[in-house]
Amino acid sequence: MTTVIVEVMPKPEILDPQGKAVAGALPRLGFSSFASVRQGKRFELEVEGEVTEAVLEQARKAAAEVLSNPVIEDVVSVHVLGSQP
Amino acid sequence: MTARVGIVTFPGSLDDRDAARAVRLAGGEPVRLWHADGDLAGVDAVVLPGGFSYGDYLRAGAISRFAPMMSSIVDAANGGLPVLGICNGFQILCESHLLAGAMIKNDHLHFVCKDQTLRVENADTAWTHRFDAGQEIVVPLKNQDGQFIADERTLDELEAEGRVVFRYVGGNPNGSRRDIAGITNARGNVVGLMPHPEHAIEPGFGPGVDGLTFFASAISATLATA
């Protein structure tokens, strides 16, 4: 099994309410080093057999058309687990 | 003759029965449609009801968009079929690209449930033509992912083309851009809004009967063209 990782983040210009809530909680719990937090999504797509360029292309297409909504999110990475993002 | 208004049920729809009841009280015949079918059964209009279809997994409305029934609705809507998306239905219409923009979590992160005043900004759509432009109405609002957003250019376009249909009055309940509560497509047959007109249709239950006018508008619009 090989795993393709897709990472999706809210667009930088969009206030991320979830990240903001986490950012508010951290200092209350003593984690005071972090100025802000943004929360995104990571998808792990398992592939039986080899991850060919065609498989990666399909992952990129799924990332753009299904796993993210371009109005509010950016696909920041599509890569094979263990490889350099 | 009676206008036949389809109500689509997805896994996780909650307000489909209320929407069907609203159609009936407005004088139409509700026709229940199932998300996995592709047949619109010859209906004259369609309502996508509120709820949490597919548990709102991935994004609100994101998975429902790929239901066979949605493919039929997108085609029919592009041909002029009146379509109303309420709450989760609005989110599905945005994910389907029938309407612009998207919804994210409310800016204050809380679930909202209240009677909400709205101003009718566009009284020319299939679902609002029996209102007066500028009229204020009250219908319930209940959601968690109700913050309407779009980029500035899209917002300017919506404003310039009169496609903002409803605006929140008396305070913005969820951080929606420019107080937008509902919008329409260029043709005016597809309308989506976060508040729930189907919960304001009977005296004594909810804030009043302003919601009936949505359904009465669509019913009279379809009869006029029949």
Image (spheres, rainbow, N blue to C red):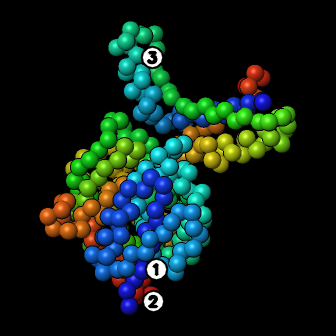
User: Between residues A56 and A48, which one lies in front from this camera angle?
Assistant: A48
Q: Residue at x 53, y 63 (%)?
A: B35
Q: Quadrant of residue B197?
A: bottom left
Q: Position of residue B130 (x, y in %)?
A: 30, 76
Q: Secondary structure at mark 2?
A: loop
Q: Which residue is mark 2?
A: B226
Tag 1 residue: B44
Picture layout, residue B119 above or below residue A73: below
Q: Which residue is mark 3?
A: A35
Which quadrant: the N terminus of chain A? top right
Query: In front here: B213 or B163?
Result: B213
Residue A7 sits above or below residue B65 on the image: above
Q: Are marks 2 and 1 on the same chain?
A: yes
Whether pointer 2 and pointer 1 mark residues with C-beta atoms closer than 8 Å, the reply is yes
Q: Is residue B24 above or below residue B16?
A: below
> Tag 3: residue type?
Ala
